[in-house]
Amino acid sequence: MLNWEALEQTCKSCQKCALADTRHNVVFGVGPRNAEVMLIGEGPGENEDLQGEPFVGRGGKLLDAMLELIDLSRQRNVYIGNIVKCRPPQNRDPLNTEQDACIGYLRNQVALIRPKIIVCLGRIAAMRLIKPDYKITKEHGQWVEKSGVWMTALYHPAAILRDPSKRPDTFVDLKELEKKIREVCTHTY
Ligand code: URA
Ligand code: SF4
């Protein structure tokens, strides 16, 4: 396991998969390194690749607004990362081989942060971190405890933008997240 400085330097020069060839920036992650809550997306899109920060496009604005509803933000109390740190071309899903190459860095981040709660954003992250046959439509908002960490998944912000009928369910899931934070976190609120 690497410390923060070594891990960030390693990621920024990483060439372990072909996504390195087309990226502008490695999107390492953002947020306080003592956060009790981590949010994990699938991988950078175009804006994220250009700016080097997760969730900064239209979906990112929606994510920030969702988080504010329950007094969370990347500036104060949540850390945001992705399964892969470089942008898949044309925003395709990251391949399993790319996820395999990259996920060790995310696991290292989790080991350094030691979050109480991990929230997967969308199906790809949930399949990777919760279970391979995760069904986002059916299982979003459900909680499982995995080696002492509470885990759930929300609809991906981009999916909510495409289908606004997902908003009410997401509001309920956010309120349940707030409840879980009040139960298991000590310095988030
Ligand atoms: N979608 C993701 O899954 N992650 C990002 O960082 C941006 C968009
Ligand atoms: Fe390395 Fe991950 Fe980028 Fe692939 S996606 S080059 S494994 S940092």
Image (cartoon, rainbow, N blue to C red):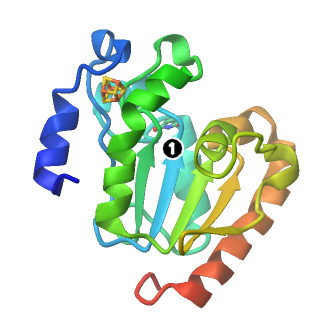
The answer to which image quadrant residue 67 occupies is: bottom right
Residue 148 appears in the figure = yes
Using residue 152 as the reference point, say whether residue 141 is left or right of it.
right
Question: Whole-percent x and y of residue 76?
Answer: 36, 71
- At a point 63% along the width and 36% down the height, the residue shown is 124
Vertical comparison of 11 with 108: above or below: above
Neighbour tally class for label 1: few under 14, some 14-19, many 20 plus, Cα within 10 Å = some
Q: Does mark 1's beta carbon lie closer than 8 Å to ligand 1? A: yes
Considering only vertical position in the picture, is 46 above or below 175? above
Residue 141 position, x and y percent, is: 76, 62
Query: Quarter-wise, where is residue 156 in the image?
Result: top right
Disc 1 residue type (three-letter): Gly
Q: Going by the image, does 31 lie left or right of 125?
A: left
How far across and how far down the image is residue 1, in percent? 23, 53
Query: Badge 1 is on which residue?
Result: 60
| Nearest the eye: 29 or 15 | 15
Q: Is residue 21 above or below residue 62?
A: above
For image coordinates 29% across by 34% down, the residue present is: 52
Secondary structure under tag 1 reads helix
| Tag count | 1
Q: Which residue is drawn at 81% across and 43% down?
A: 135
Task: Tell me if I can see residue 32 in this picture.
Answer: no
| Relative to 28, 140 lies left or right | right
Q: Position of residue 142 (x, y in %)?
A: 78, 64
